Amino acid sequence: MKERPRVLAMWDSLGPCHHARLNALSDQSEVSVIEVRSRDDHRGWGGRVDEYEPSFEVIGLNHGGSAWSPTLLAKVIGVVRSRHFDGVLVPGYTGTAALALAVWAKTKKWQTILLTDSTLGDKKRQTVAEILKRCIVARLFDVAIVSGRRAAAYAERLGFDTPRRGYYCDVVDNDWFARMAAEARGSGADIERERIGKHFLYVGRLAPEKNLVKLIEAFAKYREMGGTWDLNLIGTGPMLKTLLAVVVNSQLVPCVHFLGARVTSDLPGHYARAEALILPSKRETWGLVVNEAMACQLPILVSERCGCADDLVEPDGNGWTFDPLVPGGLAALMLRMERLPDVERQRLGNRSRTLIAGYSPRAFADEVVRMLGVDTR
């Protein structure tokens, strides 16, 4: 019997999406993962991954400092010094630990796999910095697993040609979200939806790059145009006070609702009770909430600047994209969504579920195993 490959991964903090991917990979490999921190309150996981029993080894570092800390570097090297792996998964190329792990793996002739959803347009790029990055990254990493088309195009600029690229870096546990959403739509769901009322849903940080002031402006225009649905926002962040003021000044208090942070286990119920998801970001490397909403059979309205827009949005199939800086365009799409017959919105939601099926933890695991076998000599 062929020996299963040994794979080492490293993430800053493990959330439910990481557990799903790594459990799937554990079906085909012996997996160990370095968890740099045990919590990530920035994303609202709060260290809770109750839905998953890990089938892989977790090596917790409980690091509380910078990603460039010499202490972190020493901890990571201490983990790998006396162990052997066939490949390492490194999410990104910033931070001393990530670069050191890649260098160490290269010296040991382990396959180095870069996990990246970076795109050319997700930030302002400097020519000299990009040249240096290409020189370093393409030499440190044998192959790359990217999120979608835009990330693939950027990875190619960094030196990863087609044979050295895999896909499905950004996936969630579709089956779990679908199952939990179905349960939420079950007993008593109609009464609950009637109590809450029909609404659009936003899930994510309340941060400047999420473009939420423009979202509220678009929502105000939509209501002026005759729209009747509400807007629910899940998340917290530095923009909360600003957004509350915008809502008050726009006289939208009765129909815009800030629900605060929610752990992952709460989200399927919110997706199930919404009519459509809106992700209005002006900068977003991918947008995992779109995966989650699609798994829960929601139609989607996604900013054209989100990395997932080219891959996950099928115009007139499961939703539409929009220019995030033009509130009137989004307002028109919101009104269009509301005026669709219920059966047509259900069709869009069903198409979402079909489209997202290919973006699964199993697909991620298959790509990792395939990339382990790529000869880059």
Image: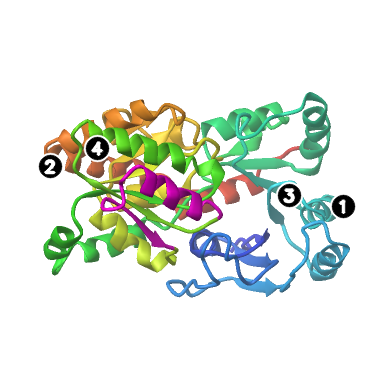
Q: Position of residue 79 (x, y in %)?
A: 79, 70
Residue 334 visible to an observer of this rendering: no
Q: Residue at x 68, y 30 (%)?
A: 124
> Do the residues under discs 2 and 4 have CB atoms within 8 angstroms?
no
Could you tell which of marks 3 and 2 lies nearer the N-terminus? 3
Residue under numbered circle 4:
223
Q: Residue at x 30, y 55 (%)?
A: 271
Q: Which amino acid does the dot numbered 1 rest on?
A: Thr
Could you tell which of marks 1 and 4 lies nearer the N-terminus? 1
Residue under numbered circle 2:
342
Looking at the rendered structure, the secondary structure element under dot 2 is helix
> Do the residues under discs 3 and 2 have CB atoms within 8 angstroms?
no
Q: Which amino acid does the dot numbered 4 rest on?
A: Arg
What stretch of residues is rendered in magenta? 238-260
Q: Position of residue 42 (x, y in %)?
A: 58, 60
* Mark pair 1, 3: CA separation: 10 Å
* Mark pair 3, 4: CA separation: 54 Å
Residue under numbered circle 3:
111
Q: Which amino acid does the dot numbered 3 rest on?
A: Gln
Picture layout, residue 82 above or below residue 117:
below
Could you tell which of marks 3 and 4 lies nearer the N-terminus? 3
Residue 53 visible to an observer of this rendering: yes
Q: Position of residue 143 (x, y in %)?
A: 69, 41
Residue under numbered circle 1:
107
